[in-house]
Image (cartoon, rainbow, N blue to C red):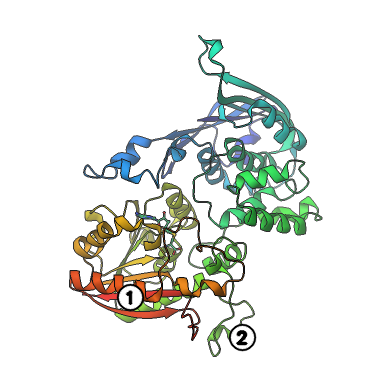
Amino acid sequence: MLLTISTTATPATDLGFLLHKHPDRVQEFGQSFGTATVFYPEADESRCTAALLLDVDPIALVRSRGKNSPDFSLSQYVNDRPYAASSLLAVALGDVFRTARAGRCVARPELPGRAMPLEIRLPALPCRGGPSLAERLFTPLGWAVEAEAVPLDEGFPEWGDSRYVRLTLRGDVRLADALNHLYVLLPVLDDGKHYWVAPDEVDKLVRAGEGWLYGHPERGLIMRRYLGRRWSLARTALARLAELGDETEEQLEPAVAEEPEAGETAADELAATEAASEAEPGTEAEPAAEGEPGAEDPKPKSLNTRRREAVLATLEELGVTTVIDLGCGQGELVGALLSRPRFARVAGMDVSPMALTIAARKLRLERMPDSKRARLSLFQGALTYTDKRLTGYDAAVLMEVVEHVDPPRLAALEHVVFGHARPQHVLVTTPNVEYNPRYEFLTGLRHSDHRFEWTRAEFTAWATGVAERNGYQVAFRPVGDDDPEVGPPTQMGVFTR
Ligand code: SAH
């Protein structure tokens, strides 16, 4: 997939400063799903073009699973979206041009504030809704839009058009705005985001959409598509954009800028993303228990935070120094483990390339000091296939993961974790379904991807069986407020060999 950005500003080579990428160099940026390359097909005083080429490598993804892992069994988690979606182009653009998107330029601080003559070309953009939708989305933002359907086959016009559009945008726009328009609207046009829309997508949308999205005539469609048709998330986003809507653009600019360092301020970031989440009621804020140090802290701790803290405290208590987080998601626990020097080796594994991409970005993998980087491995894998990479750790954590696995595959998971990897300790957390009636607006399970949620008795029965069959002892601990009637919101099993 290819995107080019050209300018005829004088000098046109200012584009290199703004993008923070030198026009003389070809630079590659590894993404978990392939490689993003930035180069300049032309760069002189009168015209300068930067190109972002995204090479998605499905073969490498498949091969990295090992020869005994049939990929069809993974199809429920990994479908063609990661390979076909232009949301990947948006992810790569967001990552590679993060500083430019935030409107920062240390070398030439005056540049980002200026609109400049830009021409953006996307020769083949997946576009559900065709050229007219592309026009409806970009025209209100000040772009002159040229959108043309790409025929399925040039030689057979009667076959009709493909779902791809050749798109050219021209306008006098600030580069940061242009990048944010693309960051939000490319996945919207594609309308096929990865199945798992994380709660922090609301934050990304609010940040990238500041100053233009709230007033956009198609904002409803944009938000619904961007957030995977999750109305609750769209409402949250809208409310927050409305709060920001009246500010001037200058005031808004700095808010786009910073992503906190993983580890140090990850908790703040989490709190922010959790506040935006209606997806899983477990992420709603709850008051801190009395007597906790958090009592003087006005911000109540969310269940996510308390769960992570419970897992960290248990690992410290067990005295382990090497930990693998299985189904690590966006890497929040991995980040917390890395920030504690006592954990000498930390690994994160997940089946979702998109989750790993987000994790790598949140952990700032590319900028991580070597000493820290050396303690970490992050890789794609599935919990239902034996894998040598899972062996050799003191402890494994499965935090809110078992309930994402189809019940018939639980025996395979048991074999992989308790039979094959066999760490000294395994920590498993999972929702306690008995607690669900305590969530006011919840109908059904806590998350759309949950295959089941267990009662305390069901979890105990499963865990006890696993322990007996594999030579482990298991103890149970509540996480969150232990309700006298229905128990805690989260249950944790601590297995020891
Ligand atoms: N442990 C994280 C994420 C929980 S969400 C946290 O507590 O925040 C569940 C995660 O499990 C998702 O990231 C999903 O991609 C992953 N997952 C689901 N099935 C999996 C499987 N079979 N193998 C590995 N990871 C899996």
User: What residue lies at 19% left-to-right and 69% top-to-bottom?
Assistant: 469
Secondary structure beneath label 2? helix
Q: Nearer the viewer, residue 419 or 23?
A: 419
**Residue 74 screen position, x and y as percent:** 34, 45
**Residue 157 screen position, x and y as percent:** 55, 11
Residue 460, numbered circle: 1
- Ligand 1 found in image quarter: bottom left
Nearer to us: label 1 or label 2: 1
Q: In the figure, 438 relative to 255: above or below?
A: below
- Looking at the image, residue 40 sits to the left or right of residue 347; the answer is right
Disc 1: CA contacts within 10 A as few (<14), some (14-19) or many (>=20) = some
Q: Nearer the viewer, residue 304 or 488?
A: 488
Q: What's the distance in space between the residues labelled 1 and 2, CA to CA?
A: 36 Å
Q: Nearer the viewer, residue 257 or 407?
A: 407
User: What residue lies at 34% left-to-right and 52% top-to-bottom?
Assistant: 379
Circle 2 residue:
296
User: Label 2 sits on what residue type?
Assistant: Glu
Disc 2: CA contacts within 10 A as few (<14), some (14-19) or many (>=20) = few
Residue 298 location, quadrant = bottom right
